[in-house]
Amino acid sequence: MKASVRLSLDIITWLLMKRKLIVLLLVLEVSICLGLYAGLRTHQLRSKSKVDTYNALHGEKSYFVLREYMNDIDYQLYLKDDGSRYFSLLELVNQLFLSDDFDFVVMRDQHLELTNKVDDRFLLDYESGNGNKDGFSCEGVQYYPLKCLQVSEEFFGEFIVSVESGRAFSSDDYIAPTQRPATIPILLGNGYKDFLPIGSRQSGFYMDQYFSFEVVGLLSKESFFFSREANKLVPCENYIIMPAMIPNLTSTTHFDRARILQLAEGLIVTKMPFKQAENALSETKRATNTTHLNIGIADPNPSTDEHNTTIFDTYSSMNDSILIGIALSLANLIWVSVFTISITIRRIINEKRHEIGLLQMLGTPTYAIFAGICITLGAVFIAGWGIAALVNGVSNISLLVEMAAVSTLMLLLSLVAVFAEIMNIDIALAVKGKE
Amino acid sequence: MISLQNVSKVYSKAGKEFAAIRNINLDISKGDFVTIFGKSGCGKSTLLNIIGTLTSPTQGGYLFNGKDLTHLSRNEQALFRNQHVGFVLQNSALIPDITAFHNIIIPLKLTMPRNPQRRHVAEEVMEWLQIYEKRNNYPNELSGGEQQRVAIARAIVTNPSVILADEPTGALDVATGFQVFELLQKLNEKGTTVILVTHDMEMASQGKSRYAMRDGEIVSADIS
């Protein structure tokens, strides 16, 4: 048995050596297939590790939206009183940050009107088709409203947001500038990568006030935030991020009053159910004497008090859908590779039907010929596996084992067709093939 | 030694059945030199393939040295061929990618584990057939006669009890064909049973036992 397997292995190796290019192409195909597998799995493992890290850090939290519901009269009173409402609100914001019951993240959609729109996808309301592509003109200069998030420092710890190049905001960036014309630092979503360089300055309006904006950094492609409108994770890709700046306490201008009102908009992050979170906020408002200010938690689902939308669920479901996509793509890739490898090997067998028939005529058992092809094809898969692992720099043992398992599966599937082809050889006809 | 009892072989093609051989009864003794004569398509090669277990009969029985070979598995048939049968075909049927020497030792690799032993046996046979000098040549570097000698060397290297020769001189000129035929006769003189299929009447007439076939049946037998 050993001798017959060795014989067919010798002969099949000889036959394949005459087809070095085809063998090389087979190795290449296997290595591309396994390389893509390794790349996708590495990406997936990295994402999973991010989810795990996120979960370990934050657990299964709920995100409740905090917003102001002032009517026009209350708003005018707030803007024009002696400043008492303004200072109360400042105190409330401070207490929200200090609360033991929940975390508070300022996150407010606040568009910027800049002189450079760069690309339509960065326009405010672009996704709904209402983006103002023409912008507006002011003193002969064209301005365009662009999507921007105004965030507190906690935003970066709470969400999956990281700076790819440049720098993150420093503590000083969260303090409102006192002198004019002032420069506000901004971070750009990864979509801006090829358009605005780090260090460049843009000029335009923020809440009707003219500012200069300095690009200090670029966010990574994998940066997401939780959108209260969409109720899902949204990529930072097309957003500008600016710091939610604490105003100078001695200033009570309309601009500062309007702006500090924006600081009261964001997310209450807690493991408590909605009712409990609402009670905790009421306590804080009572303690800061701001019950008269119409600021509260938006009911995430008016039909039930117990509704919890966790960012983790959202992230997980997003990750799951990506996983399904990856799995489907991989299954297709493996199927196509197995199909083409089987076709190629069957073609070689057909071309060499005469020689294989001769081996059988001389007494080589069918199983030995099949074993010879298995070993030869196995060597092709091992070479493909090795190249894929080397090119992708895979050092993770479990991923290497996984790749080997995928490679074995592909080999076995390919061999089914090969086996059928060998069993189909009519020896008498095959040996007469070249008469 | 060989006994075929009522053997038929029927092929199916496009739903139609075609009988290549019908109700063949044939007994061949050890050491015989059998020639089977007939025109192309009369079924003589099919008969040889059944004797060599390259094809199984559709019906009938096949005994070799008293052992029933009718229902052997593919692997058992392979083992039988390796141990008992040597084939010489019209086309020399050599593997073109390997040398004459490597072609000859293929059947030995299945039975002789040691390389020096194989080499010794193969070289002895090559010397007898006067092709030793050509041992490192590839088949396409050999003449037709030399290729056929290599094929004969491969057929006899395991010392089989039967040589099945299917038109072994069909692709050769008369002189070379005669030399090949003489080699088969010498093998027969050494005790090997030879069964030769041919459409050459003169060659067929030199067999010890002579059969003629037509339309899948043996129509005459002249047994010595």
Image: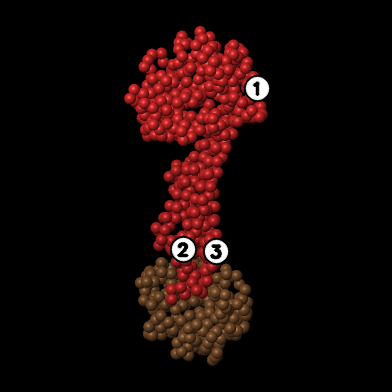
Chain colours: A red, B brown
Report the Cα–Cα distance between label 2 and label 3: 13 Å
- Identified at 49% across, 11% down, the residue is A80
Lateral position of residue A400 relative to residue A203, left or right: right
Q: Nearer the viewer, residue A29 or A318?
A: A318
Q: Secondary structure at mark 1?
A: helix
Which label sits in the foreground, 1 or 2? 1
- Identified at 57% across, 25% down, the residue is A65
Q: Nearer the viewer, residue B196 or B60?
A: B60
Q: Which mark is residue A276?
A: 1
| Residue B11 position within the rendered picture, expressed as x and y whole percent measured from the top left | 56, 77
| Amino acid at the residue labelled 2 | Arg
The residue positioned farthest toward the left in the image shown = A140
Lateral position of residue B205 relative to residue B9, left or right: left
The N terminus of chain A lies in quadrant: bottom right
* Upstream in sequence: badge 2 or badge 3: 2
| Amino acid at the residue labelled 3 | Ala
Report the Cα–Cα distance between label 1 and label 2: 71 Å
Check the image and report above or below for B89 versus A164: below
Say which residue label 2 marks: A347
* Upstream in sequence: badge 1 or badge 2: 1
Q: Secondary structure at mark 3?
A: helix
Quadrant in which residue A351 is drawn: bottom left
- Identified at 45% across, 10% down, the residue is A251
Pointer 3 chain: A
| Residue A350 position within the rendered picture, expressed as x and y whole percent measured from the top left | 47, 66
Report the Cα–Cα distance between label 3 and label 1: 68 Å
Q: Which mark is residue B25?
A: none
Q: Which mark is residue A420?
A: 3
Residue A373 seen from this side: yes
Check the image and report above or below for B185 versus A297: below
